[in-house]
Each structure stands twice: as C-alpha cells, then as structure tokens.
Amino acid sequence: MMVADDSYVIVRISDDSVLLQSSHSRPHQITTFSSDEFDELGNIFAAVLTSKKLFSFPENEKSITVFEHTVDVDESTLRHKRPADNESTYKIITLKELGQLQNHIQPSISRHVLQLYLQHYHDSRIKRRLLRGTSGSNVDSYTLRPKPKVIFFDCDDCLYFDNWNIAGHLTTKIEDHCQEAFDLPNGRAYQLYKEHGTCLRGLMAEGHIDRECSKSIDGFLDKVHDLPIHQLLLPDDKLRQIILAIDPSIRKFVFTASVRHHAERCLQALGIDDLFDGIIDVKDCNFETKHSISSFHIAMKKAGVVNVEECVFLDDSLTNMYAASQVGWRSVLVGTTGRDCGKRVTSEHAEIEIDRIHDMEKILPEIFIHKE
C-alpha cells in the first residue's frame, strides 16, 4: 500500500475511508478498504505512536482495556472479551505490543489506532498543553478524548474583539451609575468587578443592591447595558461560516457573565444569533460568575450534558480558565493580550491559546465537518 510512505499523514478518518495528505501531491482518499488494509494502516501508525514513547505498560495488572476490548494477560495466552456494559474506563496498552496483539483482537482496534494517531498528530502540531485530571490530553495518560457534545462560548471579547471598545463603554456606564446611584468613588466599580467577577456581585456583597429585589437588579442591568450595540459591532461573515462548519450534532451555547439581552444584541449585530442552542447568563447562574465552579455545573445542566470531558469552553478570562479546569472542561483561552497590562498573557490551565476566535478551526479540527 502506498500509505507506507513516510511522506503521508492522515488528516481525517471515517467508517470506511481515510483521507491522506501527501507532501508531494494533492490530498487523495482511500475508500471502502478491506479489514486487512485497515489492519495494515493500524500497524503502520501504531509503529509511529510507539516511536514517540507515549505509553507505559501496567505490569502489575492482570487485565487491561485496549480501547473497546478487555484483554486478559498471563504468561502464555491472550484472550479478549467485550467489556461489561457498565465499564467506561479506557486504558492503553503499550503500542509496541500491538503487533503481537493484532492476531488476538478484533480488527476495529486498527481504527482506534488511526484515530489516536490523528489526535496526537494534531495535538503536536498545535502544541496542545497536557494537563492532569482528564482522560485525554493528560500528562499522566495520553488517550483518545471523547467527542465533544457541547461547546460553550463566552460572548464579550471572545466571540468578537474590538480592542475592548464595548468593554470600555460598559465600564464607563457602570462607573457613572455607581457614582450616581450609590455614591461610590471613581474607580470603585471596576475594583468590585476585579474582586467579585462582576460589579453586580460586588454591589450585592456590600449591601448596595438587595439580592432578593429583582426590580433593583433588573434596573441596574438594564441601565448599564444600554448601549447602541448595532453601531459598535459589524456583522462577521467569517465567524458565521466557521460556526456553520461545526458538526451539527455538537450543541453550541453562549455562556456569559453578562445579561441575556446584551448577549442577544451582540449576536444579532454579529449576524450569528440563529446559530446557537441557547444563552446561559448571569441570572441563570444565580448571579454566580464563571469564577465559581457552581456556574459550570449549572451550564452543564442547562445544556443537557453530564460528562465534563465532552464540554469545550472558549473564553478570554484567565480566572475562568482556572475554574473550568477545576471542573474538568476542555478549555481554550481566546485572546493572548491582557486588557489591563497590554502584555502577552498565558494560562497554564488552558489546553490551547489562540489570538482570536477565528483561529478555532485550526486548533479544534475534530469538531468541524469538512466537505470534500
């Protein structure tokens, strides 16, 4: 098979085809291959993975789970069986053993080897950070990640970037209102935002607004978000096309520490308001911010997802990256320049960091549907 040539790299895998990219020619596709051909592909790329020394063999264990099959190990025999229905833990056997196992494991093992190769290839290319506490992208155990079921997008300074122009307008509106309504000194409102995640939470904490008084809360939120968003944001057709290319089986939510009507106006101005399954705002989260892990659990419940590793999160806040990592979400930092410092910022809790939301197609290829 031509795929034995080291110049070929797998770029996509489906049930009955593997798309290959050659450094010497345009992409071409192998289709409807036999199980023997699939096994050959598996062996080729198993060798590649082995050479990268990604795995270690659990010598003290009598059985190991290899993708979808449990293999009982003793000194002389290898027997495979389907895992019990309630088993969901996946471990990886040392891939240098895979050649010996090929005759004892069903051919579907090769498909998983190819998928693992593809995942590792992309992770290496984009320099995905290995973290602890997840089954995939884990510094302790690199395995196949589950397919995302939900993507959560922050709104302000994430779905759009306007050099913090709208953020500046919001800060001014909040400062002016806090000085007029609560007699706070200049700059105190922004301090409350930095200390509590939102100025509103700070006002509640200091007793300026009654948490139980919805009229006061709504009045504050309406007043400070009264901005001509359609004059400040322009439609973003490129972003629209990127979101449209996301696998339609993956649900998409805007997860914002702001209020729903502000996020709705931003999405309308950008021309993407029809592309999301819903908006989860500060009211939905009982006025908790994304600094609190409770807001992430509320977001999961509203999105109808249970497994934290099936959640992908894009946000511009370093603090939110930390909170998301504590929950176990896969997180992407959007924006690598700090608003206050003007210098490059980074988060050790984010798997990946990108400058703009438009770069997401490069770093999350697994969530996109590409037409040939």
Image (cartoon, rainbow, N blue to C red):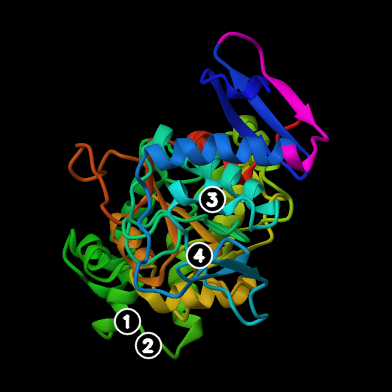
Query: In the image, which residues are magenta?
Result: 24-36
The amino acid type of the residue labelled 3 equals: Gln
Q: Secondary structure at mark 2?
A: loop
Q: Which residue is tagged 4?
A: 309
Toward the top, the furthest residue is: 24
The residue closer to the viewer here, 313 or 292, is 313
The residue closer to the viewer here, 17 or 282, is 17
What is the number of callouts on the image?
Answer: 4
* Disc nearest the viewer among 1 and 3: 3
The amino acid type of the residue labelled 2 equals: Asp
Residue 293 — which label?
Answer: none
Residue 211 vertical placement versus 222 (above, below): below
Q: Of the two numbered discs 4 and 1 on the same chain, state the one appearing first in sequence.
A: 1
Labels 1 & 3 near each other (Cβ < 8 A): no
What is the distance, in whole Å, between disc 2 and disc 1 at their CAs? 6 Å
Residue 23 vertical placement versus 223 (above, below): above
What is the distance, in whole Å, between disc 2 and disc 4 at their CAs? 37 Å
Q: Position of residue 357 (x, y in %)?
A: 48, 39
Q: Which residue is tagged 1?
A: 204
Taking the image as drawn, is residue 110 in sight?
yes
Labels 2 & 3 near each other (Cβ < 8 A): no
